[in-house]
Amino acid sequence: MVRIAVAPERETTERRWHVDYQHLSTLLWREQELLDLLLFKAEEKQYLILTGKTRWLARIAHEIEVVLDQLRTLEVERSAATEVIAAGLGLQTNPSLRQVADAAPAPWGDLLGKHHEALLVLITDLRSLSDANRELIEGGLAAIGDALASTRGPSAGTYGATGRQSDGTHRAVTLDGAL
């Protein structure tokens, strides 16, 4: 068995790159999990809207906000990890995941490319479900407004000075007794 000696400096650099890529990949897996959870929560919200179980809408809205907060925090960490790798690859600051995947060495380029594709699918699904939920809510609000408008009949009017019901076409007049 022949062993080739690798300079300690190069070995340390390669190990560090492996750790940086591994860390970014782990963050991307976590982001996919959170987006998948967000998609689930959006589908729960849609179910609640469709079934009229509005009692739970505030709770699901809170749960969605918690997931969004976690995504925001993760995004900051992912951005920092991406910047470290981008600097090592000679990319400009704030590169897209696709740019990093295209410049990364094997097998990381392929793995990051797959993360990119999975994230795009999740985000597309989330956007379409979010739009559908918004339309359902707006349609429900419009239906409520229409129902309220249809229940408002003409005013019953008030009783006039003679004790008879007035249709509201006459208005009350106050007379000053000093005249």
Image: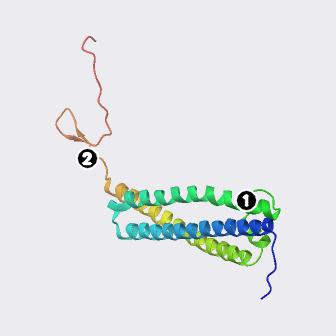
The picture places residue 166, in percent across and down from the top left corner, at 25, 40
Mark 2: secondary structure: loop
The picture places residue 50, in percent across and down from the top left corner, at 39, 70
At x 66% / y 75%, what residue is drawn?
117
At x 76% / y 65%, what residue is drawn?
13
The picture places residue 168, in percent across and down from the top left corner, at 30, 40
Instruction: Look at label 1 and name its amino acid.
Output: Val
Q: How are the colours assigned in the image?
A: rainbow
Is residue 54 left or right of 38 when viewed as pictured? left
Q: Which of 38 and 136 is in front in this view?
A: 38
**Residue 127 shows up from this direction:** no
Q: Nearer the viewer, residue 140 or 119?
A: 119
Is residue 161 left or right of 90 when viewed as pictured? left
Q: Indicate the quadrant where residue 179 lies.
A: top left
Is residue 115 left or right of 131 when viewed as pictured? right
Q: Indicate the quadrant where residue 16 lies.
A: bottom right
Q: Which residue does the numbered mark 1 point to in the structure image?
A: 84
Q: Which of 145 and 10 is in front in this view?
A: 10
Instruction: Farthest residue to the front: give it.
Output: 1
**Residue 167 shows up from this direction:** yes
Cα distance, mark 2 to mark 1? 74 Å
Above-or-below relation of 84 to 121: above
Tell me the crowding category of disc 1: few under 14, some 14 to 19, or many 20 or more residues within 10 angstroms, Cα based.
Answer: some
Q: Which residue does the numbered mark 2 point to in the structure image?
A: 156
Q: If the image is split into quadrants, where does the N terminus sit?
A: bottom right
Q: Counting residues from the N terminus, which is met first, the one under dot 2 or under dot 1?
A: 1
Instruction: Farthest residue to the top: give it.
Output: 178
